[in-house]
Image: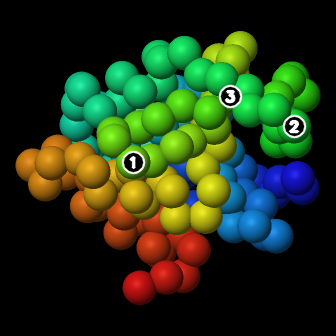
Amino acid sequence: MGLCIVHFKEIEVDYCNECRGLWLDAGELEALIQRKEARTDDPLLQFQKKEGVVPPGRKHLCPRCDQPLQEITAGTSLTLDRCGRGHGLWFDADELKQLLEMFPREAGTGKTIEYLNDLFGER
């Protein structure tokens, strides 16, 4: 996975041009949400503390420590990948938007979704 660092409106995101995936280092998800003035105390963010499993034949590796990424569930239907050593989270294309759309409207994550649309030129 070849990641490039994208700087946009004072936020740094690791992005893969090939698969349109995103890597967020530990704490960057909360920082991204907070910088866009949304609440970071939502219980939905607790998914990051769940124990994950490394599926058999897992090929996705943490870009920081090269260990296989664990699968964890967020909400009831979204499966994400995280480093078991706590280095960060991997979001396949559009998974970060899917996660943010799960938050209640009053959490304010709509601004973060708008930010991501601006960042990647989507509407």
User: Residue at image x 34%, y 41%?
Assistant: 76
Question: Which residue is labeled 1 in the image?
Answer: 77
Pointer 2: residues within 10 angstroms few (<14), some, or many (20+)? Answer: few
Q: Name which residue type carries label 1.
A: Ser
Most foreground residue, 7 or 95: 95
Which quadrant is home to the C terminus? bottom left
Most foreground residue, 93 or 119: 93
The residue mark sitting in front, 1 or 3, is 1
Lateral position of residue 9 relative to residue 110, left or right? right
Indicate which disc, 1 or 3, sits on the residue closer to the N terminus: 3
Question: Which residue is labeled 3 in the image?
Answer: 70
> Residue 110 location in percent, x, y?
25, 61
Does dot 1 land on a helix, a strand or a loop? loop
Q: Which mark is residue 57?
A: 2
Vertical relation: 53 (above or below) 7: above
Q: Quadrant of residue 51?
A: top right
Pointer 1: residues within 10 angstroms few (<14), some, or many (20+)? Answer: few
> Residue 11 location in percent, x, y?
55, 49
